[in-house]
Amino acid sequence: MPNCLVVDDSKVIRKVARHILESLNLQVQEAGDGREALEMCDANLPDVVLLDWNMPIMSGLDFLKELSRRNLPQPPKVIFCTTENGVDHIRAAVDAGADEYVMKPFDRDTLESKLQIVGVL
Amino acid sequence: MMMSGPSCAVERLGALLTRYTGQILSESRLWRIETSLRPLLRERSFASLDDLLVALDRDTSAELLALTLDAMLNHESSFFRDIGVFRAVEEKVLPRLHEAARDKKVLRIWCAGSSTGQEAYSIAMMIKRMGEMWDGWRISIQATDVSAVAIEKAKRGRYPQMDMQRGLPINDLLRWFTPVGEDWQVADEIREMIHFQADNLLDPRRVSGTFDLILCRNVLFYFPEDKRGIACDQLAKHARPGTYLVIGAGEMLTGGNSAFTNCRELSCIYVADRPVNLNGPCALRAANPLPPRSPIG
């Protein structure tokens, strides 16, 4: 069963994402910011990360840059999931190594299709 | 005694849809008719479905009929819907077609039942993504749908954010779309690859010749078996040996479709492996004449 790390400072978003992801047969872990997410990745690398942009302590983009510096042989797929919907933000995320991008609000079909695109489903 | 009330009106409207488009409404869609038509009722100040039916009886312009039928049709569509099928088309079907026509360098594709255009645009973006192997080719994508309203939306190529999220890889969004307010506009370079036209699959008048690839996905199951046979005959009529046909998961070919053989290794994909013979016995086709020409196609 694929493992997804949901990184978002909103408990509500994490709860909604968990509900959808578990219905898609993914195991779910949660982190409230980029720093916590990095620690969780160091302990147990997930298959995919659903990543918010704006978070306290460490943003999603900084998390992604830190993760890239680790030069992991099999890095997790990273799907940004954010209210930052401008082209500049999307391009910055892709340039930093994001595999996909979800613009909030999202629904089950959206997450399912993005997970299929990155090959997790 | 004459029947009246919402249930009767729903059945009459369902019958109207079948008469003009050949499509039938399943039980699950029948009860949604009122919801589907509510915006039209509000816009035209009709108090009920019965009022709409009275107006339809009096309407001579066919505009109201077109709008009514369009509201009842299912326009559900998304970019790269069923991604596994699109991967098979990209990795297996298109390379085979490329090999087969490398001398003539002509590729003709028909999206039958294209709805609001996402499927046709997906195919166009896929061909672009495949790169220079198609350089110098004459590629045409014809996309038809019974709904003129859906075709107009498809021609416009502008989609709300939620539509962009479903199935469209982010690199395709960045490459081929520009934000316009809350929506996203497809690039002219992609839009110009596709010829959208309103047309009824049961009696296509704007489609001619044969195609290398036909996509008719999630369309056939809206037809009763007899009309499905007619639709399959039309698909076969526009195929030749080597033509690939893609249908929806769970859909079946019926009628005079003996030209198509299922590609065992490719789900939902068929290939025409012998000349099409539409003169053979097809009781379904003979027993059921075409419906009247739809005012929306």
Image (tube, grey):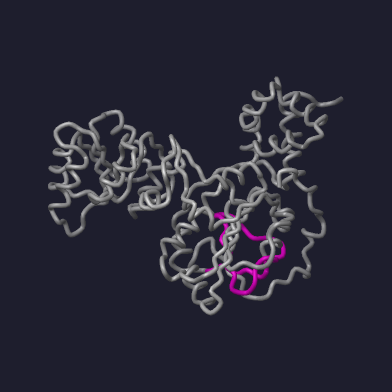
Q: Quadrant of residue B211?
A: bottom right
Q: Is residue B86 left or right of residue B17?
A: left
Residue B189's spot in the image, x, y percent?
48, 55
Give B73 or B178, whichever is nearer the viewer: B178
Residue B75's spot in the image, x, y percent?
58, 43
Residue B223 visible in the snapshot? yes
Task: Look at 44% across and 38% down and name the residue there.
Answer: B180
**From the viewer's perspective, is residue B155 above or below residue A104?**
below
* Boundaries of the magenta span: B237-263
**From the viewer's perspective, is residue B202 above or below residue B2?**
below
Residue B201's spot in the image, x, y percent?
69, 54
Q: Is residue B51 rendered magenta in the image?
A: no
**From the viewer's perspective, is residue B120 above or below residue A106?**
below
Specify the principal SS of the magenta part: loop
Residue B129's spot in the image, x, y percent?
41, 61
Task: Look at 12% across and 42% down and name the residue there.
Answer: A39
Residue A3 visible in the snapshot? no
Task: Look at 70% across and 71% down and name the residue there.
Answer: B276
